[in-house]
Each structure stands twice: as C-alpha cells, then as structure tokens.
Image: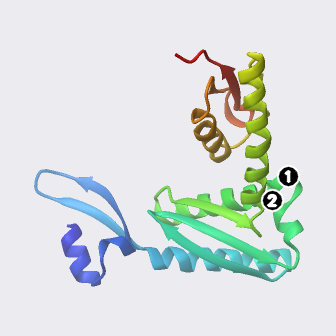
Amino acid sequence: AVEKALDYLNLDEEYLLINEIESTEDKVNIEVIDKADIKYYIKDFIKNLSELFNIDINVEIREVNGSFSIKLVSKNNSILIGKDGRTIAAIQTLLRKSLEVQTKQNIKVNVDVANYKEKNLSRKMHEIKKIAFEVAKTKVDVSLDPMNSYERRAIHNMVDAMENVTTESIGEGSNRHIVIKYVEQD
C-alpha cells in the first residue's frame, strides 16, 4: 500500500506522513499526507492568528523526523510570548489540536517566538545545574517548580550526566515537577 501511494504521488517516503487506518489479512488501508500540505496548513493557521492579533508575524517552519519546529518573529514578540511564555504555549496547543483534527494524527509541533523558549531553557538549565551541584554537595533533595515535558526531559538528560545526583518526575498534569535526589556513587 505504501509503495502504491509513493508511486501514485511520485514522492519519496521522507516527504509524507503515513498512517495505517485499517488492516485485514488481504487488505491494508492507509492515509497519506504530504508534509508540504502540513506546512501550508501551519502557515495559514499563523496567518489567521496574525489577523486576529492584528500584528504581522513572520513564520519559519522546519520539519525533522515528523516533528515541526515553528519559529515566529514579530515587532510585537512580547504579545506572542505572553507572561512566562503562556501565549506561546497556548498557540502551540491550539495548533497541535487543530492539526490533529485536520489530519487525524498526533503531529508534534514546537512553537517558539524569537528563540524565547530556547533562551529560557538555557537559563533554567544553568540554574538547575547549580542546584544539582548543591544537592551532590549537601546530600539534600530539592523539588523544582512545575514545568512542561520538554523542559523536564532536557533536565533529566543533563542531570543524568552528573555524578551523585538523579532526577525523578513527580505529580500530575500542570503540577508535574522534578525532584533532584542525592545518590551514592560506586
């Protein structure tokens, strides 16, 4: 079924999202979505958002392994960022849900405005590294403030590379946070 779709569309598999809908012994139904169509949908979504916000928004979209990184830039970045990045998070959630309704697939998107999330994560990582060193030195566990899964994953990876400390995610939903714990090394 995939080969037939690739021949029909005259595209390589890397340019498509392929979702198996139904499979029986003698038949496989698949849904094929051109990644270019997803990019057009994202651009149209941001264009509509730009009109609603009444500000010009430039958009850059990159796709890597089925995940879309969307960089937004405007003369009014602070409006798009919102307090503590809440507007970015809301835009990302709305876009992800809209794509899910449109494609019937869970498409990963990461929306950032003027590298705010990247800079914020870098700053947090620096602070948390200091905290992890303190935990290793004092042997006293520390609970961090709640954060999103992307930030938690980055912190888990960073702390895993350090000696005498480990991390654990605790809590549910918006209260999910990391505890940095002391561990004795062999």
Residue 164 or 151: which is nearer the viewer?
Answer: 164
Residue 137 or 34: which is nearer the viewer?
Answer: 137
**Horizontal arrangement in the rendering, residue 120 relative to residue 158 (left or right):** right
Cα–Cα gap, marks 1 and 2: 8 Å
* Mark 1, residue position: 84
x and y, in percent, of residue 166 in the image: 61, 26
Q: Residues within 10 Å of mark 2 (few under 14, many from 20)?
A: some
x and y, in percent, of residue 9 in the image: 29, 82
Residue 181 or 56: which is nearer the viewer?
Answer: 181
**Horizontal arrangement in the rendering, residue 31 relative to residue 110 (left or right):** left
Which residue is at 72% across, 78% downward? 48
**Horizontal arrangement in the rendering, residue 149 relative to residue 91 (left or right):** left
* Label at residue 9: none
Which residue is at 31% across, 71% downward? 13
Element type at marker 2?
Answer: helix
Q: Judge depth for marks 1 and 2 and give the one in front.
A: 1
Residue 67 or 156: which is nearer the viewer?
Answer: 156
Specify the quadrant of the image occupied by residue 59. bottom right
Which residue is at 51% across, 73% downward? 38
Specify the quadrant of the image occupied by residue 128. top right
x and y, in percent, of residue 45 in the image: 66, 74
**Horizontal arrangement in the rendering, residue 22 relative to residue 61 (left or right):** left
Please name the amino acid that badge 2 sits on: Thr
Specify the quadrant of the image occupied by residue 115. bottom right
Which residue is at 30% across, 57% downward? 20
Residue with the most extreme left position: 26
Q: Quadrant of the N terminus?
A: bottom left
x and y, in percent, of residue 142 in the image: 77, 23
Please name the amino acid that badge 1 sits on: Asp
* Label at residue 87: 2
